[in-house]
Image (cartoon, rainbow, N blue to C red):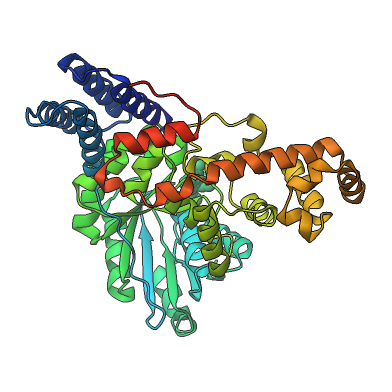
Amino acid sequence: MLNKLSSVLKKSFDKIARAVFLDKKTIDTVVKDLERALIQADVNVHLVKKLGAEIKKQAQDKKVKGIEKKEHLTKILHDKILNLLGKEKHELKIKKHKQIKIMLAGLYGAGKTTTTAKLASYYSKRGFKTAMIGLDTHRPAAPEQLEQLGKQTKIQTFIDKNEKDPIKIYNKYKEKLKDFNLIIIDTAGRHDLDKQLTEEIKSLNKEIKPDYKLLVIQADIGQAAKKQASEFQKTCGINGVIITRMDSTAKAGGALTACAETQAPVYFIGTGEKINEFETFNPKSFISRLLGLGDLEGLLEKVESAVDKKDQKKLKEKLEQGKFNLRDLQSQLKSMQGMGSLSKIAEMIPGLGKVKIPENLLGTQENKLKKWNHIINSMTEEEINNPEIIEKQTSRLSRIAKGSGTTTTDIRQLLKQYKMLKEMTQGAGDLSSMDMSQGLSQKQMMKLAKKFGKKMRI
Ligand SMILES: Nc1nc2c(ncn2[C@@H]2O[C@H](COP(=O)(O)OP(=O)(O)O)[C@@H](O)[C@H]2O)c(=O)[nH]1
Ligand SMILES: [Mg+2]
């Protein structure tokens, strides 16, 4: 996601950290690099120029002296970009005792149908009794597409392949829908927000009275999202946005900042085609990920959709205390298999974004994960809790290898990866307690750098 912007940001922060003295020249270079990267990410030029000028002005604040200057600039950069992205995290208010209806609208190919299923699955995993209803009577294969997604996600789906009037379909299932806590409504798109589409959405609004009318926009359209969001706001009363295809474009910066400008809250982002490739949008953690500092909150949320709440809490505690054993690794590996690629997960583990991790830890190597699973299953409780004893006694190694149908090299490799992961996750506690709104202090950066072996010169 936004790899280019991310790498420029990381470089800029490194540049600041390394500078012996923060002179005007260094500040100008940092600002120039940042401006260029933002424009490449399709952020509006005027916004970028304004941001650049503000950073320069504030960075030269005479009151701030010496080493504090670097912290000051780091914080300014962080806060300005945060501002550009919309600052706060917005959450849909979904309650268990009240029925909530969410209607998705948008143009052709924006990702409405896929997002209907992603959203339904997101809330269903969090214990809401969720149903989907397909009201796209415009595109011929639309009901089948939703039906398919319903099967895949095991979410109750209401469609009617023959009826051409969306209102009639809705009314047909109105009674049945009363059994559900949360209803996600998929609607038809058009090439533009033309008269026909406007009328259709208006009449659906009137009949269904959704609690949320969310516009689905694909990130590829970049800053054009501004015009689209404000038109949908005006004519169809949309009150929030979901941005899809964040993974497949360099222009996502444009779409995100444009929505922040129109004050249309971005609730979720789609980061891939798979159902699980979907997350809440939190500007703060989004930035810390861009900066490569990891995002414990985001990681835990992703894990949350795959494991249950109790495990979740335990894992959080373990991560924070650095008490992470092979059994936890095993359950993590299992849930990771359903969570998309390991490299995506790694981006979210605190600290991992900044370090070079051996390829073999990151590749989605299903076979290896399976092998590791077998190995852990062949271990005794004592060995799981205390893996060091395995390496010390070759008899244990060969017994496990035999039992799991693997080799002693496989086992050694697993133990090595486990140690590495354990070491890395020990940074989690530090980071989770770190308040990003305060920016990163020099001390925190140094601590991070030390922990992960990257030397930072100052
Ligand atoms: N890479 C990627 N593809 C997506 C994402 N969301 C949707 N898509 C794809 O975009 C295409 C259009 O999606 P669809 O839901 O049918 O759009 P609709 O016409 O608005 O209903 C499909 O091929 C989806 O798989 C996403 O977040 N990332
Ligand atoms: Mg569709």
| Quarter occupied by residue 178 | bottom left
Q: Nearer the viewer, residue 267 or 367?
A: 367
Q: Going 35% across and 25% down the picture, which residue do you hit?
A: 14
Classify the position of the C terminus by image quarter.
Answer: top left
Where is the N terminus found, in terms of image quarters? top left
Task: Tell me: 367 left or right of 13.
Answer: right
- Residue at 23 percent across and 47 percent down: it is 260
At 68% from the left and 54% from the top, the residue drawn is 334
Q: Is residue 252 visible?
A: no
Position of residue 430 measured from the top left corner of the image (x, y, whole percent): 42, 47
Look at the image and tell me whether residue 339 can be seen.
yes
Q: Please count the marks in the image.
A: 0
* Residue at the farthest left position: 62
Name the spot of residue 190 as percent of width and height, x first.
37, 50
What x and y, as percent, mark residue 370? 77, 48
Report the residue at 21% width, 50% height from top.
230
